[in-house]
Image (cartoon, rainbow, N blue to C red):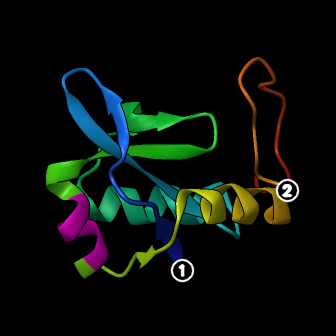
Amino acid sequence: MTVYIDPPTWPGHGRMWSHLVSDVSFDELHTFAEELGVPRRAFERDHYDIPSHRYADVVRAGAVEVSSREVVRLLHGAGLRRPKGRMGPARGE
């Protein structure tokens, strides 16, 4: 299982956030997040939002650090990208 995380550079709700993604399936992503105790409500369309204070925990658990641009490339390559406003099923479901 390989999941990926970008740096916590996305502001929101008074903190900084990272995106946790899979390049295989949403099932893989949900399993990884569940094992870390990340609530399902943190899942948004095609990724989990991870607060900056959890970043190191997620990397220690096995997430591969990549750039934000790489996160988008991985999602597109896997057919898992879900832009805002298009919530149809992605290939990994």
In the image shown, does 31 or 79 lie closer to the viewer?
79
Which residue has dot 2 on it? 79
Q: Which mark is residue 2?
A: 1
Residue interval drawn in magenta: 55-59
Identified at 37% across, 59% down, the residue is 7
Q: Is residue 60 above or below residue 83?
A: below
In the rendered image, which quarter is residue 22 located in?
Answer: bottom right
Give SS at disc 2.
loop
> Magenta span has 7?
no
Instruction: Please tell me which residue lies in front, 62 or 68.
Output: 68
Give the crowd class for mark 1: few <14, some 14-19, many >=20 residues within 10 Å.
few
Residue 56 is a magenta residue: yes
The furthest residue to the left: 53
Q: Residues within 10 Å of mark 2 (few under 14, many from 20)?
A: some
Q: Answer left or right for 78 relative to 66.
A: right
Residue 35 in the image: state x and y as whole percent.
Answer: 30, 65
Residue type for callout 1: Thr
Which amino acid, by three-letter code, is at mark 2? Gly
In screen coordinates, is 68 left or right of 50? right
Residue 26: where, in percent of width, then height? 63, 55
Tell me the CA gap for discs 1 and 2. 16 Å
Who's the residue at 75% across and 37% down the image?
Answer: 82
Q: Secondary structure at mark 1?
A: loop
Which residue is found at the position 19% from the left and 56% from the top? 54
